[in-house]
Image (cartoon, rainbow, N blue to C red):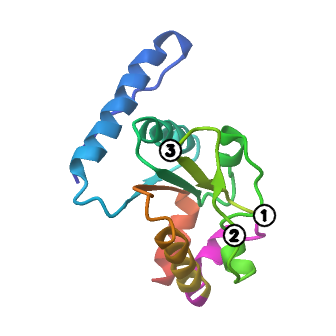
Amino acid sequence: LDLLAAVPRFGEADRHFATEAYQNLRTALIFARRDDLGQVVLITSTAPQEGKTTTLVNLAQLLAASGEPTVVVDCDLRRAQIHHRLGLPREPGFTDLFTKHEDLALIQETRVPNLSAITAGPPPPNPPAVLAKKPEKKSAIESLGAIFAGRKSTNWQLDELSAAAQAGLKARN
């Protein structure tokens, strides 16, 4: 994997360094894309509190501000924060794809032009187990594909996935 950008830890006094790093990451992603059919970016880390949500929200807002239609999907089912950061309700959301098995209006528009989100949805009792179930996972992925296919103007899908959820997915595949 190529390094696209490095985002430093920052406080209020040196926030401009982080802003520039996020802008570099946005530019690198735009130049690295293969075509205009849509891109999926997974934001993840090995441990909690490493900046996944901050990176996801900043990158999504920068892509949207540059005219790139963007959808954020909050797959962090334990510590979902995207809905707070974007001022949206948590439900309906991503877990509804696994539990209700029906087409829902999951994509919520934000106050930022070109930026939409699928929030985490209701918290499940065991998030890794929910994501690890193969039939439900396949159905949810197909549902997401259908949702995004209906939005031909979406260029970017940014997902956040916790390390625990990654482990559950890898254990079942």
- Whether the residues at callouts 2 and 1 have beta carbons within 8 Å, the answer is yes
Marks 2/3: CA–CA distance: 19 Å
What amino acid is labelled 1 in the image?
A: Pro
Residue bearing mark 2: 95
Q: Is residue 95 visible?
A: yes
What amino acid is labelled 3 in the image?
A: Leu
- Give the residue at x 54% y 37%: 54
**Residue 125 lies within the magenta run:** yes
- Please tell me which residue lies in front, 22 or 128: 22
- The secondary structure type at the circle numbered 3 is helix
75 w.r.t. 89: above or below: below
x and y percentages locating residue 108 in the rendered image: 66, 55
102 w.r.t. 21: above or below: below
- Give the residue at x 45% y 50%: 69
Query: Residue 122, labelled with which disc?
Result: 1
Marks 2/1: CA–CA distance: 6 Å
Tell me which segment is drawn in magenta. Answer: 124-135
